[in-house]
Amino acid sequence: MPKRDLISMEDLSRADVELLLDTAESFLPVLERDIKKVPTLRGRTVVNLFWEASTRTSSSFDLAAKRLSADTLALKAGGSAVEKGETLKDTAITLSAYSPDIIVMRHPSAGACQTLSANTGASVINAGDGNHQHPTQCLLDLFSLRQNLGRDLDGLKVFIIGDVLHSRVARSDIMGFKMLGMEVTLVGPPTMMPRGIEAMGVTVEYDLANLKDADVIYVLGIQKERAHSGADFLPSLREYSRLWGVSRARLRPGQRVMHPGPIDRGVEIAADVADDDENLIAHQVFSGLAVRMAILYRTIVGYSDGTASGEVV
Amino acid sequence: MERTWCKSAPAAEVLIKGGRVVDPESGVDAVQDVLIAEGKIVDIGNGLKPGTNTTVVDAGGMLVLPGFVDLHAHLRAPGREDEEDIASGSAAAAAGGYVAVFGMANTDPVVDTATVLTGLAAMARAEAVIPVGFFAAVTRGLAGEQLTEMGELGAAGAVAFSDDGRPLASAALTRRALQYVKVSGRFIAIHAQDDSLFRGGQMHEGPVSARLGLSGIPSLCESLDVSRTLDIAEYEDAALHVCHVSTEASLIAIARAKAAGVKVTAEATPHHLMLNDEAIESLDPNLKMNPPLRAESDRKALVAALKSGLVDCVATDHAPHAPEEKDVPFEEAPFGTIGLETAFAVLFEGLVRSKALDLATLVTRMSAAPARLAGLQPPSIAKGALANVCIVDPKAPWTVSRETLRSRSSNSAWLGQRFETRVKFTIAAGRVAWEDLA
């Protein structure tokens, strides 16, 4: 079987996505047991390569691999040969000497997964590359939506709010949301809307006037440095939060708020929304584990082997 | 004035038999024999007989063309001989059918004094298999501050002046350069780019960059600088050449300027003529160049401009890079693709075979037009002319690979691609420079 990478949401068909979400669902009971471990990937090796800071993604991938009984190896840029100038190609060759089955990587540069994949026999899973893609985030977002709003997401309206220009999450989510039939509207400062993004089949708006139409409100984090002097994306965080910050006053009942984290209270999201039990933010983190277990599992056993979800565990 | 140099070699004694001779300069398009003796074309006709020491080349089914001239290559010497040098770069050019090639000045050290230029000329005299010439920098060290000694550099044989790789940052500097270049009788060639709009750009700004999350290089980044520089050239009545035009907006500005009588010429590269930004979806670092591959509408406008002559010539912007520089993630890779060995195959198969351009026009844009800009006698297959000829087999499949390339570098936008068209024989300045006959 040729190796299967997950670099972009475009690597997945709709059937693949649905299979991954079903597989993730089948892992949920495992996570509620006293002994939260299955022998499924015993003897397999999963390497986590994080060249960029990460809390949620790296910890959930590490735990997901351990829950599946895989051997794990974690490398970070700090303290590794990268600090001595080793190229990604050489890191890939070095790690490949251990014959890992999967390498999960986060990297600051778009295209890093292609470089890695070309130099290893392991399957590559993209845990975020530059502003390009973050497919596993998208899959866990879809999982949270399905768990909370029902299996059929067709026709749901989602507003993605914030710095789309610098967001790999937004790019993966647009693809995943569209794939499952959702209607996507992007809202944010004109300086943070990529020219030509409409070609992805989305509507672009610069204010929250139509926010009431949304079933789901997906809030992107706003990096403080975008408003620093020298940067010219935003005049100030204060104005950002006045124009695009999501607060309770702007929401109607029943709207569900999501955020990939880490959140910055008072900037893109008000505390009253962040603390509201109705939001899906904590559920997204919870979903990360089951979804990443499903991704690791399907990467090894295949996407179309006919395994019924109940047989997985 | 000597503007190109190459090593000495025996004068060609060759009879090219039965090829289709296409020479727009002399108006020939017919199956003819071409007899070359002592490096000169001595006869053209049917049933020509070889002399005693004449090599006979059977060119049946092949094209016999005036050799090409490349006004824009990076030969990397001095400084990065691991990527290319005069010997390998000129060999690559010969293998692409070129009979003269000009290196840009962004070497290490920069070609900004007559001493460096004279050294390069000596190197070319020792190593070059076809005539090689050189641009000199507009500003010392390409720093964008102090002008180079253009009088002395022109006298030492600089073909023209360019800070290629970098734009001339200010209007004031551009104006001074366009004024002062007149002491040399040559022209300024610009790499048009507004740096404030470029800012860490990775690829053409548009739907594809939006989708890939790569920082965009707007077409405005080029056209704004083109327009501004054209205004200055008009004001100063100075000669300007626009390197590697990539956008429709730049072409509109150049057309307006040409109509107004501005002394402007322009070049386009094979990659901008044949590829568009959608290719970047693969995130292949060999497709990363500056200016970037643009939108399909820009590409079409460029092809139309090459056809009409608004774009005067094809230039490769041959930019070799070491494997360790390109074998990195797209966002970390340097800009540039090599192009000397694929230029004719790419454009012949992409434009001539698809009927977008006729062969004679392509030949003119690759041969006589750039030769005139360089101040060289245009190559022509005419009795009495110095032999500058290439023979192209349009049915000779080959694949672009490390093994088939003569360049020291392999960073080709077409790496791994198969072509049907191959240059089989090149005679440059009366000497056989490339031979790939079975």
Image (cartoon, coloured by chain):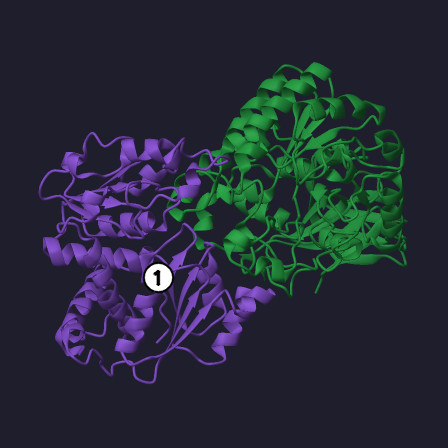
Chain colours: A purple, B green
Amino acid type indicated by mark 1 = Thr
- Badge 1 is on which residue? A55
The residue under the point 53% across, 33% down is B197
Badge 1 crowding class, 10 Å Cα cut-off, few under 14, some 14 to 19, many 20 or more, is few
Q: Is residue A204 visible?
A: no
Q: Position of residue B378 (x, y in %)?
A: 78, 35
Q: Position of residue A50 (x, y in %)?
A: 43, 64
Establish if B154 lies above or below B64.
Answer: above
- Horizontal relation, residue B429 to residue A9: left or right: right
**Chain of residue at mark 1:** A
Q: Decide which of B365, B325 is in the foreground and name it.
A: B325
Establish if A252 lies above or below B33.
Answer: above
- Horizontal relation, residue A303 to residue B22: left or right: left
The residue under the point 60% across, 66% down is A84
Q: Quadrant of residue B194?
A: top right
Establish if A298 lies above or below B110.
Answer: below
Q: Position of residue B233 (x, y in %)?
A: 69, 20
Disc tally is: 1
Q: Quadrant of the N terminus of chain A?
A: bottom left
Q: Quadrant of the C terminus of chain A?
A: bottom left
The residue under the point 32% across, 52% down is A262
The residue under the point 28% across, 35% down is A244
Q: Position of residue A19 (x, y in %)?
A: 20, 65
- Horizontal relation, residue A295 to residue B10: left or right: left
Q: Quadrant of residue A254?
A: top left
As helix, strand or loop, the secondary structure at mark 1 comes to loop
Q: Quadrant of residue B385?
A: top right
Q: Decide which of B47, A32 is in the foreground and name it.
A: A32
Q: Is residue B424 visible?
A: yes
